[in-house]
Amino acid sequence: MTANPTAFTSELTRDGRVELSVRPAVRRLLKDWFGFYLPATVIALVMLFPFFWMISIALRSEPEIYTYPPHIFPETIRWDNFARIWSDPRMKMGLLFWNTLIYATVRTFLQLLLSSMAAFVLARYRFPGRDAIFFAILATVMIPHEVLVIPLFVIMKHMPLAGGNDWLGMGGTGWLDSFKGLILPGIVSGYSIFFLRQFFLNMSSELEDAARIDGASEFGIYWRITLPMAIPALTTLGVFSFQFAWSDFMWPLIITNSDHIKTIQLGLAVLQSSEGTEWSLLMTGAVIATLPLISLFVLLQRFISTGISFGVGR
């Protein structure tokens, strides 16, 4: 058969007819484009459009937002919206940003530490009731977060010997409106323990056995051997935990009351009132609040993909 520069090849059938068929390479190319790249591109555009629209609104003046029909791109880019919201006395963006950073960072660090210790014990040691404990922890994953809000609030309010309470937890405010009440209820997560346990189960125990022969303590094995090997899983879990804490709205709304302890999500709610919503400033604040999360995903995407493939994919 001679070389054919076109995308089609011709074949002579037994009954004398000539059939045209698409070349295999072209067929594979069309299959890749219409079977993967085109749907993936459409899905990506649909997923990115809300973020693009948020930025577009953030760069407009307030009257332009209500023009009809709406424009995809702003007529005049208003970069000064970022300066306005940062200097707005109602917002105190610097303080809100700092509070959110402390809340998300400390909560994520403690959650990784405690969850990795629990997962290490459940994955590496055999003791009576181990499976029952694991399934009890796994069952907590199925409980909606909203169901736990009221019990957690009552526990925080009646914390003994805190916030003016007596040893029975009465008479004061406990850990309400404090960083302790804001952070501590989120430092233990059933999903985190499950995620890390699955990762530890897939790890080889040869190095741990060798360390035991050399006389290493059990905590030393966990801290010096297992934990460094689990950095991809810890990074993946840490990014998702940080993202959840950073964007959390319900628990900070319930547990905090003072302005000096509010997070950025609560601060943005100031721009919404019965008199109306300042959409340009609100979207500008949302863009500022989203930038740390995007930076985190971009910087740690290599560890995230590795952690997901090793911890969940197997």
Image (cartoon, grey):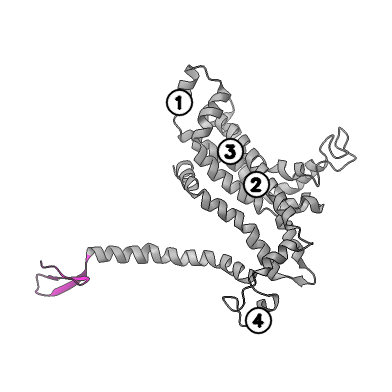
Residue tagged 4: 67
Quadrant assignment, res 186: top right
In 3D space, how far apart are the residues under numbered discs 3 and 4 (Cα atoms)? 50 Å
Single out the mark in the foreground, 1 or 2: 1
| Mark toward the start of the polypeptide (4 vs 2) | 4
Q: Which mark is residue 143?
A: 2
Residue tagged 3: 193
Residue at 76% in and 58% down: 92
In 3D space, how far apart are the residues under numbered discs 1 and 3 (Cα atoms)? 22 Å
Q: What percent of the width, then of the height, locates residue 14? A: 9, 70
Q: What percent of the width, then of the height, locates residue 144? A: 66, 49
Q: Residues within 10 Å of mark 3 (few under 14, many from 20)?
A: many
Mark 3 residue element: helix
Query: Which quarter shows the C terminus?
Result: top left
In 3D space, how far apart are the residues under numbered discs 1 and 2 (Cα atoms)? 37 Å
Which three-letter amino acid code belongs to the residue tagged 2?
Answer: Ile
- 19, above or below 123, in the image: below
Which three-letter amino acid code belongs to the residue tagged 3?
Answer: Ile
| Mark toward the start of the polypeptide (1 vs 3) | 3
Q: Is residue 18 magenta?
A: yes
Numbered range of the magenta stretch: 1-23
Mark 2 residue element: loop
